[in-house]
Every structure is written in structure tokens, then in C-alpha cells.
Image (cartoon, helix red, strand yellow):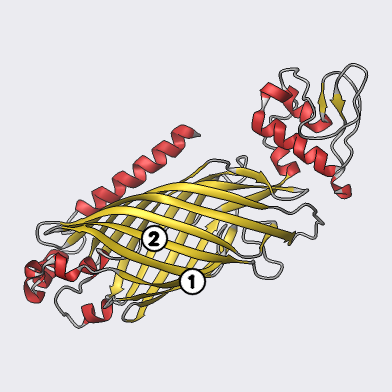
Amino acid sequence: MQYFKRLSLSLASTAALTLASIPFGAARADDTKVAQGTAADLGVMSISLKDAIKPNFGFQGALQGAGTPNQAGIGGFLPLVTGDNSVFFLDAQANANFADFNNYSSIINTTVAGTTISTSSRLGYRWLNSDRSWMFGVNAGYDSRPMATGGTDTGVNVSNSSTVFYQQVAAGLEAVSNTWNFNAYALVPVGTKEYRLNSNYFGGALDTYGLDVGYSITPDFKASVGYYYQDGDFNTADGSGVLGRLAYNISNGLTAGVNLSYDQAYETRFSADLKYRFGVNGNKIASEKKAGQTPVMQALTDSVKHRDVKIHDAFWEEILGIIAPGSVIAMQVLNGVVGTGVGSFVNAVDAAEYLMACVVMGPLLCNGGVRIADPFAVGNRNPNGGWGGRLPDPGGL
């Protein structure tokens, strides 16, 4: 699995840089001429980036998607060091995360509740090639997401709903021309990745590795398609997915987008987003062929994409299903036995806590014959010092 993740990221990054370096002369002979004409006709080569690149700030919002919440907040782009042909920058956002739509979970089963504040920050470096027909970029950063939980959309009654905290580190590569754009990214959870959300469900942050390829239909209307691989939440969400996006520049600085994704974990998910930035001229001016406002020049101050912490949840029986059937650990988890006695759990919460200990800590506690000193659950002890019992029937949860 680790090898596959490293391979996916390596292939995505290599593909982005390789595609970006191709002049696309064979596929579309007039692309190079258009780029050269743009630089000459619009005076791009004579533009000073120190005059053209300015801080911008504004608002953004999005509807819930595959593992991501309804949210709205503020964000901004701050150039830290601007050179003759490059910029080193900080891109930061803070969003209020809202409850899921009624009876429709964004993380599969458990609904997101309440209001929490998530953050996202990126440090990056972007530069132009010699004729300023391409922009290249690298970025890295950190994202956080507290998440409050409520009921479920499955009809299962739950108790002990909790608020948990996820975080991830991120890295990305960019390549943008006046016609094409490529974006390779990696989102890697750190710290505690899985939590018990309530009496029945566990939730985990997902590793995600992807590559998007975009095309400017017009300077104001862009489309992209992407591939991603995700894994996590005790391996219950592992698999590949596809993502499509359409974005339109409504007016200077105001952009609306719609997204459609599919993978086996979330199946089909639709979302929409809206962003406004003060101090951005936008692609409307690019379509009017004013100097310095081509898609390449605008990309120097665009917000970095893909920055949400993606969450997936699973029922405890699904998690049990990832353990090899018939193995010692499977039998111990299924029967809830550590030691040699027979007993029973007091309630479903105790059983869930014990299951969490077995899955997370593995053979040390569940397969090594070590008796747990009861930090996770209170069960009926037996004379031999063991404790445990059969996990409760799903109908009784």
C-alpha cells in the first residue's frame, strides 16, 4: 500500500511536469504561435511583476462534497518576495464549517453538525518561463479541520457523539499556459487519523493523491478532469476516483464553479463553490487583451487548489471486515476475548472501544495474549484474569 501511494504521487508529479514542458506543437500547431503573439501583442515581456503582483483578499464558500463540509470563510494571497520573473507567496484561508444538509451525510453515515473553524495555509513559489507563455509552481502547507458530529442518515440510533480534530500536510505542483493547466497534489493526514465519532461509527481522514488536467474553453470559461487515489479510515475508503470541474469568471474577481466526482467510497457527489477576491482584475480583462492579464499572469496570484481535509466514516462491522477472516485477531475481536475466560461487555460503547483498541494497536494487545488492564472498557472479569464477551448484535446497537 505504501509503495502504491508513493508510486501514485511520483507518477502524478512527473506527468504534470512532463506535460507542462511539451509545446503541444504536434497536437495543436497554432498554440505556440498564439503564445508568442500574446507576449508580443500584449507587452507581457515588458511587465514588471513587482507592479503586477499585489496582495488580494476576499471570501469563498462551498457546498458539501465527497468528505468535505458546507463552508464559508475568508482568504487571501500575500506575495512575500517578488523577483523579475517569480514570486514567493503565502496563501491562507479560514472557513466556518456548517452542518450537513438534512439527512444527507457528507462523510457517508454520520452527519456533520454544529459550526467549527477550519484553516488552510500554503507557502509557494511560482515562476515564468523565458517567454512568459507558461507559469510553473510548487507549494506546501498545513490544513486543520475540527469536526462536530450529530446523528446519522442510515436510521441507526447513536449516542456519545463527539467533536474531533483532524489535520494534514499538503504539497502540490502547478503548470499553467494560456490554454492548458496541470495540477498534481498530495494530501497526507498527520497526528491522530481515526476517531470514534459515536457509539457505532469510526471516522478517519484520507490520504489523497491526484492529478488534474484543465483546458481554457474561453479566457472566462474553464474545464478540467482529474484522477485521484485515496486511502484511509481503516482501509474502508481505499480506491481510485475521477473528478470533473467547470468554472466561470462572472466578473472581475468573482468566480463560480461546479464539481462532480465519483469513487466507490462516496459514489457520485456534486458540489458547487463561489469565490470573490478584491484587487483581482480577472480574466474579463484577459479576454479584452489588456497587458498583464493573460491566464498565465493571473495564475501567479491564484489560490492554491485542493486543501480540504477529507473524512470518511464506517460502521464497526465494516472495520471488522478488513481483518483476515479466521485469524486469531479476528476471532478475538469478534468474540471480544483477551485471556482465557468468558464474559460479556456492559454495552455497545464498551465493545466499540475494545474494537478500536484491537484495530489500532493490533497484535500487541489483541494477538499477543496480553490482558488489557481495562483502560478501554469495563467488562465482566473471569477467574483466570481474562475479560471480554461477544460483540453485541447489530440490531441491539
Do we see residue 369 in this rendering? yes
Residue 173, image x and y in percent? 31, 51
The quadrant where residue 59 appears? bottom left
Left or right for 86, reference 348: left
How packed is label 1: few (under 14 Cα within 10 Å), some, or many (20 or more)?
A: some
Which amino acid type is shown beneath numbered disc 1? Gly
Q: Image height check: is 297 above or below 276?
A: above
Taking the view exactly as shown, the residue that stands out farthest to the front is 80
Residue 74, image x and y in percent? 44, 69
Left or right for 25, reference 152: left
Label number found at residue 164 = none
Do we see residue 327 in this rendering? no
Image point (16%, 73%), residue name = 292
**Element type at marker 1?**
strand
Q: Which residue is mark 2?
A: 92
Image point (89%, 16%), residue name = 384
Query: How many numbered circles are shown?
Result: 2
Residues at circles 2 and 1 in contact by the CB criterion of under 8 Å: no
| Marks 2/1: CA–CA distance | 14 Å
Q: Which residue is mark 1?
A: 61
Q: Image height check: is 122 above or below 300?
A: above
Q: Image height check: is 113 above or below 144?
A: below
How packed is label 2: few (under 14 Cα within 10 Å), some, or many (20 or more)?
A: many
Image point (6%, 69%), residue name = 46
Q: Image height check: is 379 above or below 224?
A: above
Query: Which is closer to the viewer, label 2 or label 1?
Result: 2
The quadrant where residue 27 appears? bottom left
The quadrant where residue 357 appears? top right
Residue 236, image x and y in percent? 63, 44
Which amino acid type is shown beneath numbered disc 2? Ala
Residue 282, image x and y in percent? 28, 77
**Element type at marker 2?**
strand
